[in-house]
Amino acid sequence: MPVESWTTVSGLRALSLKAWNSGALLRELLEPSGAYPRRRVLKRPTAAALLSDYAAAQRWAAELFAGAGPYELETAEVGRRTVGSNRIPAAAVFGTVEDEIGFVGKSREAAQLRALASQLGELDPLLLTWAARRPLKVLELGADALTAARVALWLRDNREPGIYVRQLGLPGVHTKFIERNRQVIDQLLAAVVQDADGGDDEDGAEAVLGDPAEAPVEADSPTVALDDGAGRTPAARFARRHGFLHPPELVRFRILDPAVPALGNARDITVTAEAFSTLQLPVHTVIATENLVNFLALPERPGTLALYGAGYGFSSLRDAAWLRDRGVLYWGDIDTHGFRILDQLRAVHPHVESVLMDEETLLAHRHAWGEEPSPSKAALTRLTAEELALYEALSSDTHGSAVRLEQELIRWDWALERLR
């Protein structure tokens, strides 16, 4: 075994630091498993290595012996038949987890964790389970972990509060705090609700039960199906999940036909999604686009209304039943997520047709292609044969790596010709 592969003091410290970075040492600190004394085996010189470079082996062993203190060394006999009997370090033994934590220079952080965990336990002993499973998160949050815990306990005791998050009267709690710590609050709530409710949340708080350290963790990208009624932002979904009030979703539209009566001379109008669902406008065609400039630049057109929705924000159209009697055109980016939005829009309004989302348009604008950051691989079931073929070509990089054509980069004369 070559000299560079022998476990040095720095190599041993790297092993311990890996255990720290995984949270294993801190979990052991809060919930001892009986793993200590812990024995960490050392890669060491063979008898042949002693024979070929005895001096290097001596220096290696001397360094390990000099570093002893946080650990004790076990030795093994090597080289009896070649250079004579030698006892060299074979394993480092840490008597306690505190010894190993001190070895990597993290004693101060460990003390902080213990103090935070103790305070969490005073709030509710069930919170200790979450702290033990996510100790590094507790350290990252610091005092905010205690504030988040108080919010979770308040939510446990106040189902369906019917107020805005802004109205929470807890010290240190404000809207931005909730926004930053939604996932942690949900995890903490799961930790205290699963036992209180016997594992069954029947009161509508919608806390995800099970492993309180892992659930629920909600991705912040608003890729929510249009027909799930969850709201299109993480903040809206959090509010709905816990019974808070939330500002209503808004729908912005432009009436492209000057002959259609509106609010005086107003043509660019924003209303709540609820109000939009009750409209009965005398139009026969709706053009939905997710690009603001396209929305604003669409020219006058008889019997037509333009709708603006930011990406997956078309969830606000879920209850607009009157759209089922109108022709609806969807103009999105030519990329995998553009087709996912189209697929989800059709979950509510199956008659939606795509426009300017075809291979001809894509290939005619090769000079404007960009790269999609995280292409979708989802199976889409509501696309036409041509749409599906293009979606699969984009997903499989047929035309290039992660190709996308953003709708605002399509030549305006090309777009107008096809919109007519």
Image (spheres, rainbow, N blue to C red):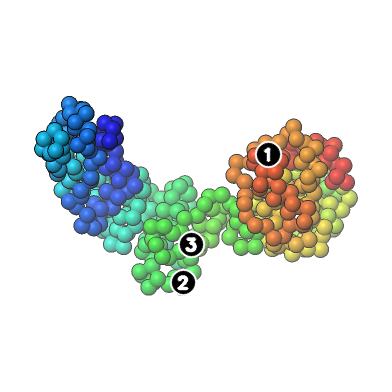
Circle 1 residue: 400
Q: Residue at x 74, y 61 (%)?
A: 349
In the image, 313 versus 59, the foreground residue is 59
The answer to whether residue 264 shows anywhere in this view is: no
Q: Residue at x 27, y 48 (%)?
A: 25
Give the SS element for disc 1: loop
Which class describes the residues within 10 Å of circle 2: few (<14), some (14-19), or many (20+)? few
Q: Earlier in the sequence, mark 2 or mark 1?
A: 2
x and y, in percent, of residue 413 in the image: 85, 37
| In the depicted structure, whether residue 205 falls above or below residue 413 | below
Q: Which mark is residue 203?
A: 2
Q: CA distance from mark 1 to mark 3?
A: 44 Å
In the image, 132 versus 192, the foreground residue is 132
Circle 3 residue: 242
Instruction: Give the left or right position of residue 293, taking residue 37 as reference.
Output: right
Which class describes the residues within 10 Å of circle 3: few (<14), some (14-19), or many (20+)? many
Give the SS element for disc 3: helix
x and y, in percent, of residue 253 in the image: 75, 50
Q: Amino acid at mark 1?
A: Gly
